[in-house]
Image (spheres, grey):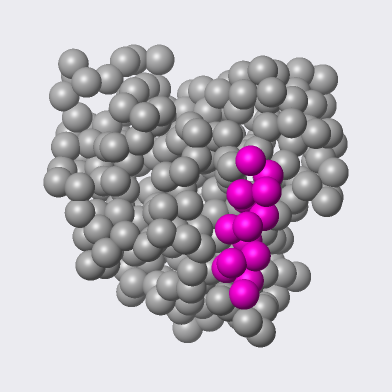
Amino acid sequence: MRIIVCENYEEVSKKAAQMILSQVTLKPNSVLGLATGSTPIGMYENLVSLNKKGDIDFSEVRTFNLDEYYNLPKENDQSYHYFMYKNLFDHININPENIHIPNGMTDDVDAECERYDELIKEAGGVDIQVLGIGNNAHIGFNEPTINFEKGTHLVQLEDSTIEANSRFFDNIEDVPKKAITMGVGSIFKSKKIMLVATGENKAEAIYNTVYGKVVPEVPASILQFHSDIVLILDKEAAKFLKEEDYKIA
């Protein structure tokens, strides 16, 4: 596990975008696993800028998003479909046919989950998976539980996650209670994983991810076993880490 600590959110966003740039430069038809939430917005802004300058070409890139709210229309401005187009896809030269996001409005959840996992497999797997992390160490929408879910599945969101996401909605009652998410097993199959975290509220989750026991109650702890993972953090998120365990950007 490599850990890079940056001065602030802006530097974290630049560093994360540079890693995506390197990946796509080396492999123009890369398969990118993408995340939503407030943390990756800065990275997406940097990627849009790089694309407009001609430094990165998304024309052959394929993307798979981690998750989507269940029973929330993609036209809703809080859906992750809407988020991805607003913050990235509408501003870069990506082929719409190469964009994949779970269908949260499906009538058959099991079939949709199987379809999504099969699409990732057919694409050759994810080359680099971008992750955020929840205050309770969830990755994707894999909440603390008694076992690690392998594939894409429907999950009941924890109250703490609903509360954290309520800042994006008019009131907490509007926040979806379920989501379709890649499982920990799906995430773990990615060739490379890049976890991005900022803010003091993520410091405990980062500490448990790096030093804690590998248990499903701390979903991100499974990342300790991955062969190619990098954490890109700001100083606040890294506040509980030992200095000898990370590199200053």
Q: Is residue 9 above or below residue 55?
A: below
- Is 64 or 242 nearer to us in this picture? 64
Q: Say which quadrant the C terminus sits in.
A: top left
Q: Is residue 44 above or below residue 246?
A: below
Query: What residue do we see at 58% from left, 40% from top?
Result: 126
Q: Is residue 212 above or below residue 118?
A: above
Residue 142's x, y, as percent?
A: 39, 61
What percent of the width, then of the height, locates residue 26? 67, 18
Across and down, in percent, residue 143 comes to 34, 64
- Counting labels gives 0
Quadrant in the picture for residue 92: top right
Left or right of 112: which side holds 203? left
Residue segment shown in magenta: 111-124
Question: Which of the 4 image quarters holds residue 107?
Answer: bottom right
Task: Look at the magenta stretch and give its main secondary structure.
Answer: helix
Task: Pinpoint residue 28: horizontal percent, then vertical percent.
Answer: 74, 25
Q: Is residue 44 visible?
A: yes
Quick check: 85 left or right of 150? right
- Judge by depth and name the residue closer to the eye, 191 or 200: 191
Q: Quadrant of the N terminus?
A: top left
User: Left or right: 116 with respect to 148?
Assistant: right
Q: Residue at x 29, y 46 (%)?
A: 222
Viewer-closest of 248 and 108: 108
Write the residue at 47% across / 52% down.
Answer: 186
Is residue 80 visible in the rendered image? The answer is no
Q: Report if residue 187 lies within the magenta region.
A: no
* Image point (78%, 47%), residue name: 98
